[in-house]
Amino acid sequence: MSRFSDHPTPLGEVLRGVARRVKKVDLTVMEEVRTLWPTLLDPTTARECQPEFVKDQTLVVSVPSGAYARHIMLENEVILAGLAVLGHRAPRSIKTIQKA
């Protein structure tokens, strides 16, 4: 069976495949995390802190300062419980990184 097809592959599918191979990142789950994010935190925190990617079941969140990093870690259980609706694809832990 040939690897090539007369039918084009959607660009989004190709990009998700590349991301999984390069970073082992599931872009589909990130779309869902970003949709849920504003419902899990207060509006200011949700706006200032952004979920970046999930790798090895860890959600990486960029934060503008150490104070926000501390706040995210204090809300860790609430955030993970809210993301549990994603089932087996849900992150199991959170890591923060400071924005440059």
Image (spheres, rainbow, N blue to C red):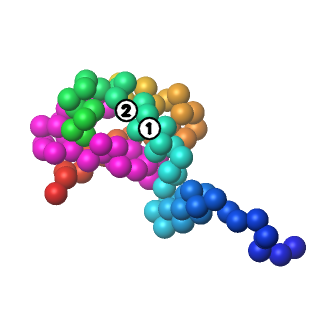
Q: How many marks?
A: 2
Where is residue 28 drawn, in percent x and y? 54, 46
| Image point (26%, 47%), residue name | 62
Q: Residues within 10 Å of mark 2 (few under 14, many from 20)?
A: many
Residue 66 among magenta residues: yes
Task: Give the labeled residue for mark 1.
Answer: 33
Image position of 24 with respect to 2: above or below: above
- Which residue occupies the extreme right position in the image? 1
- Residue nearest the observer in this picture, 39 or 55: 39
Kind of residue at badge 1:
Val
Where is residue 50 drawn, in percent x and y? 30, 42
Tell me the CA gap for discs 2 and 1.
6 Å
Circles 2, 1 touching at the beta carbon (< 8 Å): yes
Kind of residue at badge 2:
Trp
Which label is found at residue 37? 2
Magenta region: which residues? Answer: 50-76
Q: Quadrant of residue 82?
A: top left
Dot 1 lies on which element? helix
Residue 92 visible here:
no
Q: Residues within 10 Å of mark 1 (few under 14, many from 20)?
A: many
Residue 93 among magenta residues: no
| Image point (49%, 37%), residue name | 32
- Residue nearest the observer in this picture, 7 or 34: 7
Where is residue 92 drawn, in percent x and y? 44, 39
Dot 2 lies on which element? helix
Residue 51 visible here:
yes
